[in-house]
Image (cartoon, rainbow, N blue to C red):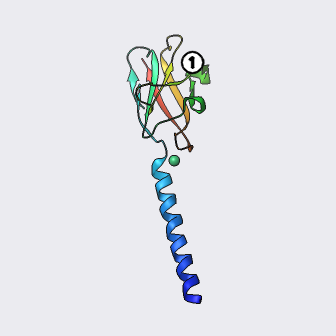
Amino acid sequence: MGFTTSRMLQTSALLVSLLTATGALAHAHLKNQSPAADSQATESPRQLTLTFSEGVEANFSGLTLTGPAQAKITTGSASVNAKDNTQLVVPLEQPLAPGNYTVDWHVVSVDGHKTKGQYHFSVK
Ligand SMILES: [Cu+2]
């Protein structure tokens, strides 16, 4: 009986670690973005495009854009590309003044997991 119990515990510990590893792989990580992180755009972008490793849910995903002097920039609402649900698109309603910008993004991937992060770009 002791043998069976410890064997069962081992098996469930293995299952838990396997499930955990699979869950971590399924999270939406930011793969690339436009304007690119740490890049300098020569003219104001019309939109911000963020591409993730997994599909994301538009209703629970978005970003805040902070500009020069910590000013919060009003953007259009985030949407997911109808042809590619790994792409989150945020239109800009007015041209960005020259300076440094910070993007704080948060997404919920199609598997229901939340991820978030931050990157910077600048406009010349
Ligand atoms: Cu996940």
What residue lies at 49% left-to-right and 20% top-to-bottom? 99
Please tell me whether residue 113 is drawn above or below residue 36 in the rendered image.
Answer: below
Q: Nearer the viewer, residue 105 or 51?
A: 51
Q: Nearer the viewer, residue 115 or 43?
A: 115
Quarter location, residue 58:
top right
| Tally of marks | 1
Quadrant the N terminus occupies? bottom right
Locate residue 70, reporting x and y percent. Answer: 61, 24
What residue lies at 39% left-to-right and 23% top-to-bottom? 40
Locate residue 57, reporting x and y percent. Answer: 54, 33
Query: Could you tell me which secondary element the residue under label 1 belongs to?
Result: loop
What residue lies at 44% left-to-right and 33% top-to-bottom? 86
Q: Is residue 32 left or right of residue 116?
A: left
Q: Which residue is mark 1?
A: 75
The yes-or-no answer for disc 1 within 8 Å of ligand 1 is no
Locate residue 114, reporting x and y percent. Answer: 57, 42
Please tell me whether residue 107 is drawn above or below residue 73 in the rendered image.
Answer: below
Q: Nearer the viewer, residue 12 or 42?
A: 12
Quadrant the C terminus occupies? top left
Locate residue 13, reporting x and y percent. Answer: 54, 71
Quarter location, residue 81:
top left
Please tell me whether residue 102 is drawn above or below residue 55 in the rendered image.
Answer: above
Q: Nearer the viewer, residue 94 or 86?
A: 86
Q: Residues within 10 Å of mark 1 (few under 14, many from 20)?
A: some
Residue type, mark 1 in image = Thr
